[in-house]
Image: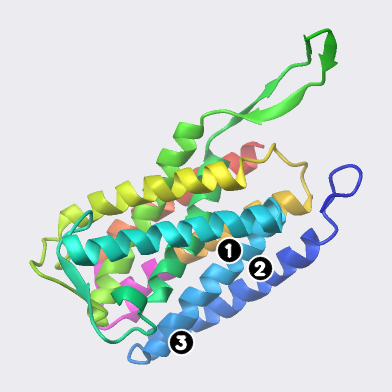
């Protein structure tokens, strides 16, 4: 996957695919606002999010690492949902309706895909927001070890990534409840969503971020203009686009509009995105 000097021969193509899929996703997202009753568009949006994130992540690391991290996040999300629908842990007592299909084990596959796609994007946001440090050259066992840039603050990346992913649910749960995709046994105070749901999201998101951190690995800071850096930026852009479009959707597109959800989700996701872009500009 690497030429001499660290270039990725397929990185440019992967980023181009990611940008194209992101553009199609934006169009599909707009269509869902105009045709909210067509639930097929919701499935298309989630699939495009996952595909775009996977393309960008493949450029940012390697296709093998990206696929492994994505698969682990999907599996963790599916397992959490499967357990949740049977035990009420960790999200609360809820069940899916018959709207989304396929539903192996009672859990819609697109729900698991959403954990994977936005999980990769949220991890990239945290990676950009948390700084790295350089380990200087040193001697080890009688031989020189060259200076290299290595990550630090893995705990910070995992925690911030979990917050960034949970912030998305401030939009996701109210929107999916509007569409009748799942039902809470006891409605809560946030647009019928129990507050314990967000604690559950944070817990599962911590697991998802840990898996992505371990499998994808945190890459050393790439030089400006490289395909790896562009791929990471693409993931941050995907997260930012979702934040902007969800905010606009709840504020002015959906009927009835919901300024509370627009503000809560917009501030939460927007803050995470701004931290990531601040880290990008600083580097």
Q: Say above or below: 149 vs 118.
A: above
Q: Secondary structure at mark 2?
A: helix
* Mark 3 surroundings: few (<14), some (14-19) or many (≥20) residues within 10 A: some
Q: Which residues are magenta?
A: 245-259
Measuring 24% from the left and 49% from the top, which residue is drawn there?
Answer: 199
Relative image position of residue 9 (x, y in whole percent): 85, 58
Mark 3 or mark 1: which comes first in sequence?
Answer: 3
Vertical comparison of 34 with 173: above or below: below
Q: Residue furthest front?
A: 105
Q: Quadrant of residue 259?
A: bottom left
The one nearer the camera, 257 or 59, is 59
User: Is residue 250 inside the magenta stretch?
Assistant: yes
- Residue situated furthest right in the rendering: 4
In the rendered image, residue 276, in percent from the top left (x then y), is placed at 53, 45
Residue that badge 1 annotates: 53
Which element carries disc 1, helix, strand or loop?
Answer: helix
As drawn, the label of residue 31 is 3
Rounded to the nearest whole Å, what is the CA distance between mark 2 and mark 1? 7 Å
Marking on residue 18: 2
């Amino acid at each position: 996957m690497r030429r001499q000097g660290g270039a990725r021969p397929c990185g440019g193509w992967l980023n181009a695919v990611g940008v194209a899929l992101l553009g199609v996703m934006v169009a599909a997202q707009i269509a869902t606002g105009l045709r909210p009753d067509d639930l097929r568009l919701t499935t298309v949006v989630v699939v495009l999010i996952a595909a775009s994130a996977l393309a960008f992540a493949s450029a940012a690391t390697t296709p093998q690492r990206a696929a492994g991290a994505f698969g682990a996040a999907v599996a963790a999300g599916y397992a959490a949902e499967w357990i949740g629908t049977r035990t009420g842990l960790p999200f609360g007592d809820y069940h899916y309706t018959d709207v989304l299909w396929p539903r192996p084990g009672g859990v819609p596959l697109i729900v698991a895909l959403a954990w994977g796609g936005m999980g990769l994007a949220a991890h990239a946001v945290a990676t950009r927001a948390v700084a790295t440090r350089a380990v200087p050259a040193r001697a080890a066992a009688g031989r020189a070890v060259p200076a290299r840039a290595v990550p630090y603050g893995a705990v910070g990346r995992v925690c911030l990534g979990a917050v960034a992913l949970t912030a998305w649910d401030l939009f996701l749960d109210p929107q999916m409840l509007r569409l009748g995709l799942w039902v809470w046994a006891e409605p809560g105070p946030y647009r019928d969503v129990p507050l314990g749901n967000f604690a559950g999201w944070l817990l599962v998101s911590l697991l998802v971020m840990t898996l992505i951190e371990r499998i994808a690995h945190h890459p050393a800071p790439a030089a400006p203009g490289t395909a790896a850096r562009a791929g990471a930026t693409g993931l941050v852009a995907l997260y930012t686009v979702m934040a902007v479009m969800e905010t606009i959707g709840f504020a002015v597109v959906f009927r009835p509009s919901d300024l509370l959800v627009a503000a809560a989700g917009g501030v939460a996701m927007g803050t995470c995105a701004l931290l990531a872009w601040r880290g990008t500009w600083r580097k």
